[in-house]
Amino acid sequence: MTARGAISTRAAAGLIVFLALVAAVVAVALHDPIGRRGNRLGRDFAYETKDLRPIPPDLIRYAERAAFDAGLAVPRAIAVDAGDKIYVAGDRAVVWFTTHGAPAGARALDGEPTCLAVGADGTWHVGLGGHVEVFDPAGARAAAWTPHGARSYITAIAAAPDAIFVADAGERLVLLYRPDGAFVRPIGGRDAARAIPGLVVPSPFLDLAMGKDGLLRVTNPGRRKVEAYSLEGDLCFAWGEAGAAIDRFCGCCNPVHLAVLPDGALVAAEKGLATVKVCEPDGALRCVVAGPDLLGENALGCDVAVDSRGRIVVLDPAAKKVRIFEPAPPGGSRSQETGSAHE
Amino acid sequence: MRFPIVPTLALVAILSGGRAAAEQRFPPPDFSPGYSLPVTEAQGAPARADARGYIDAAVLAGALALASYLALGRRSRRGLVLLGLGSLAYFGFYRHGCICPVGAVQNVVLAITDPGYALPLTAALFFALPLLFTLFFGRAFCAAVCPLGAVQDVVLASPVAVPGWLARALGLVPFVYLGAAVLLVATGSTFLICRYDPFVGFFRLSAGLDLTIYGAALLIIGVFVGRPYCRFLCPYGALLGLVSRLSWRRVTITPAECVRCRLCEDACPFGAITTPSPETPPARRAGKTALAVTLLALPLLMGLGALAGRALSPAFAHTHATIRLAERVWLEEAGEVEGTTDQSDAFRATGLALDDLYLAAGALRARFDTGTTILGVFAGLAAGATLLRVSLRRTRRDYEADPALCLACGRCYRYCPVETDRGKRHRKPREAAP
């Protein structure tokens, strides 16, 4: 290569390097690593749920017949006793109402309740963070059980005549106790030999309910499933699919609450796009009780209970209200009768 | 002269690929029939991520050992090239450039400054192993293990020498970059090195347009300027350069006595070969004066750095999410902007007091003021140290590889006639065999 050729080549290289350097500096200057200019993604990536909120009217077969204030700043759990009295736990208390929503009593607690169950004999079982406390029908404290594990966080209790089932979201287990508080066995823990995949609980929501067929229904929110266990702890069957369709469970971890109707159907509540729906015992969608248009979008989810008449009692933590739903012809879930029930 | 611009651009286009639709949506998309839930740990699968991390660390240790052997024992440029390509394939494209020792610096700093952060063993190993090997065997990591270095080596086709003064000035940038990265991690702002990694987007086939241009520009520069990122940007390289000055063993151009043939003078594309001292050294008095001036200038440089750093504090502080949020909320409350942002809405939804937010932001601003001042002093010190190194007169008898700048790539081996002669002598018995 001649000297002149070498110089022109070097000049060309210098020009290319210079232009590349300018491009690099501009690119770095335009780079937005902290998202100051937003994510600049299209609508496909937007946090947009409005298309998912509407529910086909013919699927809504319940109507809200009454609603009343729970009277608590942070209502957490709801239960109905054999006489259809409605109990709400929250703040540091349990309050109860008549079946029509009139205040009937209150009892202070030593801590913030996380769940509540009222047995057929009127005994209350209250989850207080990591442990369970038992109260007699008059509200006197009868016992306080020791936490099962260091990570215990009790999120649901179901009382059967000879057994108390406790959902421990912290330990990812259902705990079976005798009514006197003696621990019997864990249920739902991962066990390959028994083909039990284990409970996946990404957030503090794990619920259970005793089915009319004698099988315990347990939510497996991380798997978007409801699982049915025998009292011996065998996994009998499970149902539920992840998805945004109304007959599936949406989001990261749903359903969050369960209740059982007199005919054995299951009431399942989802958080996020708050929805309460009724499913057949095998999981097929029967109908919807209320959807996000009424319950809104809330991260807590609505606890649910069922009274002896088949009314579905919903605790709406966002509105701090108790809503009572009754079967109705297909259509909207809010009826003209909605109002303060006891007035 | 070869101008592989078209292949380079084609490579960039292929590597950058399309922008992967990796954003999470809520609610998640419907899974059509046939989809089965992936196997999770709860179903008995092994803890894959942890095991993979240990495998990566083991591969790193093995690659470092092999690179050290190839550079110092075998003195094999070909072996180093093959190992570099392997590292590019494994650590780059297969492991997507993460975790890498360059970014692991930030994990270590975070572990030191944030008591709530537990340093993963893998990150600790990735940070420490290359430094350890450098302490014993020179920059084996840069030679053939770092995927960022390897991808630049692939495109280096027509190296031109960078003037010494410019290379020394640009050589300060990695120290400033390192200091800035440490500051931003220590204040809980961001992992700066990862945010501006020029090649990781290529490795993952998911680079945005700006980082694609940035990486492509560095590769185009790398066609003519040897490893521009390693020499003039890499903060981990700054650390390795310091440690390599203390190396027990390191690359030598000649395996025996230098014959001063000058054949290797232009062999290094990284400007890492130092020439012998002139026969007639400059006046001793002039050297002493230059040294004295530099020593006197050192506090001045550090002071100027401190002032500059302090002036840049607001810009650095704005990288912190809490400070940005506080500024935004303050503007909204003062009615100086219209509407709200997702962040300000989320803050108000927490119910926390505005004063608490402002207090937190104020405390962070104070930390940034201190931190950027220290960063400025550090930058001034680095500049002064560079000037001192230039001022100090050392007597060199041979052509030598600068311990801090040499990347142990082995390119200079084949330029050395002593090496060539040794190779011939080693081959002779085999050639003579029947």
Image (tube, rainbow, N blue to C red):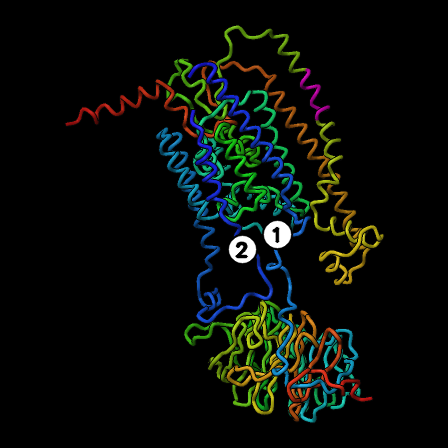
Query: What's the magenta bit mostly, secondary-structure-wise?
Result: helix
Say which of A150 and A231 sits in front. A231
- The residue tagged 1 is B117
Residue at figure coordinates x 54%, y 72% from the top left: A224
Instruction: Give the image location of residue A189, x and y in percent.
Output: 50, 73
User: Which quadrant holds the N terminus of chain A?
Assistant: top left
Instruction: Give the image location of residue B215, x and y in percent.
Output: 54, 39
Residue type marked 2: Ala
Residue at figure coordinates x 65%, y 14% from the top left: B290
Residue type marked 1: Tyr
Chain for disc number 2:
B
Give the magenta part as a residue range.
B293-301
- The residue tagged 2 is B21
Residue at figure coordinates x 58%, y 46% from the top left: B107
Residue at figure coordinates x 65%, y 93% from the top left: A308
- Few, some or many residues within 10 Å of mark 1 (<14, 14–19, 20+): few
Say which of A5 and B320 sits in front. A5
